[in-house]
Image (tube, rainbow, N blue to C red):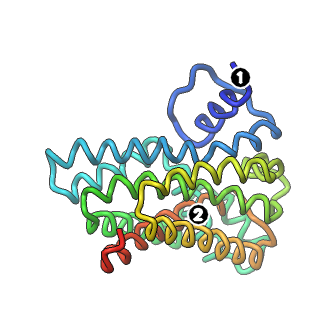
Amino acid sequence: MTEWLRLFLIAIQFLTRLPVPERLQASEETLGKAAKFFPLVGVIVGAGAALTFWLLRHLLPHSAAVLCAIIITALITNGFHEDGLADTFDGFGGGWTKEQALEIMRDSRIGTYGAMALIFLILGKYSFLSNLAPGQVWRWLIVTHTASRWTVLPLCAWLPYARAEGQGKLVAKQIGKAEIFTGSVTLFGAVLLLSWQAALAALLVTGLAAFLSGSYFRARLSGITGDCLGATNQLTEVALYLTAIILSRFDLL
């Protein structure tokens, strides 16, 4: 097995519940280097959702096919990023200090802020995608799942890890220019599915989402955690769907 293939399989194993040929042991170094393939894993997740939507849109109403596509992404990833979003909102909503926020985020139980965040998140995805033309839904599913996973790369390269340990730290410590470049090539390839106006808007919104969330995390925690990365992933995804809706109003898709 070549090293790049091994790293790619490690990325799949880390971010999804998709089966890989064998259970691969990932060290701190290999998991960080595998992050270059996170956007490519996003392509796979997005393609699974797009295929689900495309097959079901001939059998079900448009909105029902959209809902099934959203559900399939959660099943593929086992709600990995949604869990990070809920923990992050619980921590920032209930904790006044860095220490309080980190302690709440470590609690596996979901609180009011996390539950509300998940409800609004799913409603946002469902509403925005349901109002897109069928020919655009599958494109944006692939682009958003790619772009949202790309945000891990600049955030980890920019900010220190806020905890002494954690899964996110294994990724963050090893991400450098090579990982960002490789992941960015995948992102740029994905946005080619869109018109040039939509592609430019998607890239700008993705970069802005990473910058704004990173700035907030730096102010509140002086760094990031794995939950923060998951939250940015989900916020970027729904922000891109909203971008698609706005663009559709001006016939720029």
Classify 203 as above or below 149.
below
At label 2, counting other C-alpha atoms closer than 10 Å, the crowd grade (few under 14, some 14-19, many 20 or more) is many
Res 235 label: none
The residue to which callout 2 is attached is: 231
Compared across the picture, whether 116 is left or right of 210 comes to: left
Lower sequence index among marks 1 and 2: 1
Marks 1 and 2 sit apart, C-alpha to C-alpha, by 32 Å
Count residues near mark 1 (Cα–Cα under 10 Å), then give few for <14, some for 14-19, many for 20+. few
Q: Secondary structure at mark 1?
A: loop
Point out residue 194 in the picture as x, y percentages from the top left corner. Answer: 41, 60
Q: Write down the quadrant of residue 220 in the picture.
A: bottom right
Identify which residue is drawn at 74% across, 33% down: 26
Tell me the element at label 2: helix
Query: What's the residue type where badge 1 is placed?
Result: Thr
Q: Where does the image place residue 22, in percent across and percent down from the top left?
A: 62, 20
The quadrant in which the N terminus is found is: top right
Q: Residue at x 34, y 52 (%)?
A: 138
Residue 106 higher or lower than 36, as above or below: below
Query: Does 148 sit left or right of 140 as displayed?
Result: right
- Residue at (68% x, 26% y) in the render: 24
Say if 164 sits above or below 31 in the image: below
* Residue located beneath label 1 in the image: 2
The spot of residue 190 in percent (x, y) is 50, 52
Say what amino acid the circle numbered 2 marks. Ala
**In this rendering, position of residue 11 left or right of residue 165:** left
Rendered residue at 76%/44% (across/down): 32
Residue 17: x %, y % from top left = 52, 36
